[in-house]
Amino acid sequence: MMSEKEFNCYLCGHNKKENVIVIDSFSVSRCVNCGLGFLETSGITSRTDAEYGQDFYITNKMIKDPEKAIKDCLPKVKFIKQLKKSGNLLDIGCGLGYFAAAAKREGFAAYGIEGSEWAIAYIRRQFAIAAYLGPLEKCELPQISFDVCTMWQVIEHVDEPLMLLKKVRELLSPGGYLVIETRNYRGIDARMLGERWNGWSLPYHLWHFDPGSLRRMVNRSGFTVVEIKLNYSAYVKNKIRKVPVLKLLRNPISSLFAGSNITVIAKKT
């Protein structure tokens, strides 16, 4: 990632950084100007296809009952349908294809990109979806203009997120939407849980975002940010559950505090 001796922020070019957290042998710092967080340890890159075989998905309990997994993804699809009712949808980092399959069921022409040959074979076999082996910049997609591109918990794993977003913009049709969900390292969950916050996921998360840095990255890639949504705080909600008099108010109170995820909706104009 960044040299210990010399620092220039990947996003804004600023030359000052500060430490955020150290977990075991890994350190996360952030740019003091734009707030982009990054993994300090040199020599760490995104995981390779060899690490994402069948054993990986079994060990991490990612292989689910397809019908239940599709049903669990329907709220996200309904969210997308508020932007576009139908059209060509590309899910980048599609995992085992459950979201793409849910989008297909709801009327989208769904496509997926994933960095695992085993996952690609699973998606094609299970859902008959056009799935392509990533990374995106090396992927031979059909000559098609996409109406929506989604990235659910993907951008934090990518070596060159700006390059990826610029490529996505090329694939989108005019007026097309980009939807990114990633972790919010400045949410109250991260601040209160510290090392125990599961959003760090070191060393596999190479980048760490807050709303400002994610907006800046998306804007710099040529998109217009339409909306930024912050999910409610699970930490606050769990604390409120333990107070009987406040238990019924746990949802409205926890919604006042930014939790672990950020969602950015952007448009190609």
Image (spheres, rainbow, N blue to C red):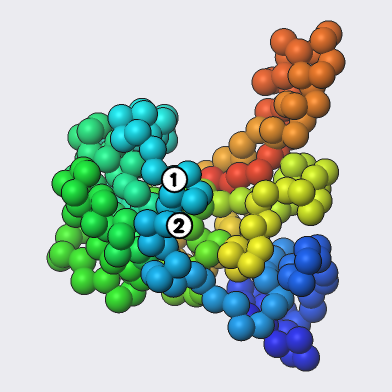
In the image, is residue 195 above or below residue 32?
Answer: above
Q: Nearer the viewer, residue 68 or 103?
A: 68
Instruction: State which quadrant residue 143 falls in.
Output: bottom left
Total numbered labels placed on residues in the image = 2
Residue type at the position of mark 1: Met
Compute the Cα span from label 2 to label 1. 8 Å
Q: Nearer the viewer, residue 52 or 89?
A: 52
**Are there few (<14), some (14-19), or many (20+) residues within 10 Å of tag 1?**
few
Picture residue at 67% right of the left edge, 69% below the top:
38
Instruction: State which quadrant residue 31 falls in.
Output: bottom right
In the image, is residue 44 above or below residue 151?
Answer: below
Query: Mark 1 — residue?
Result: 62
**88 relative to 195 in the view: left or right:** left
Residue type at the position of mark 2: Phe
**255 relative to 156 in the view: left or right:** right
Q: Can residue 45 be seen here?
A: yes
**228 relative to 194 in the view: left or right:** left
> Which quarter of the rendering shows the C terminus?
bottom left
Q: Are marks 2 and 1 in contact (CB under 8 Å)?
A: yes
| Residue 120 picture location, percent across and down | 27, 58
| Residue 52 picture location, percent across and down | 42, 63
> Which quarter of the rendering shows the N terminus?
bottom right
Q: Can residue 36 be seen here?
A: no
| Residue 264 picture location, percent across and down | 52, 49
In the image, is residue 243 above or below residue 30?
Answer: above
Query: Mark 2 — residue?
Result: 56
| Residue 58 picture location, percent across and down | 43, 49
Picture residue at 67% right of the left edge, 20% below the top:
251
- Numbered disc 1: secondary structure: loop
- Numbered disc 2: secondary structure: helix
Q: In the orientation shown, which residue stands out farthest toward the bottom?
A: 5
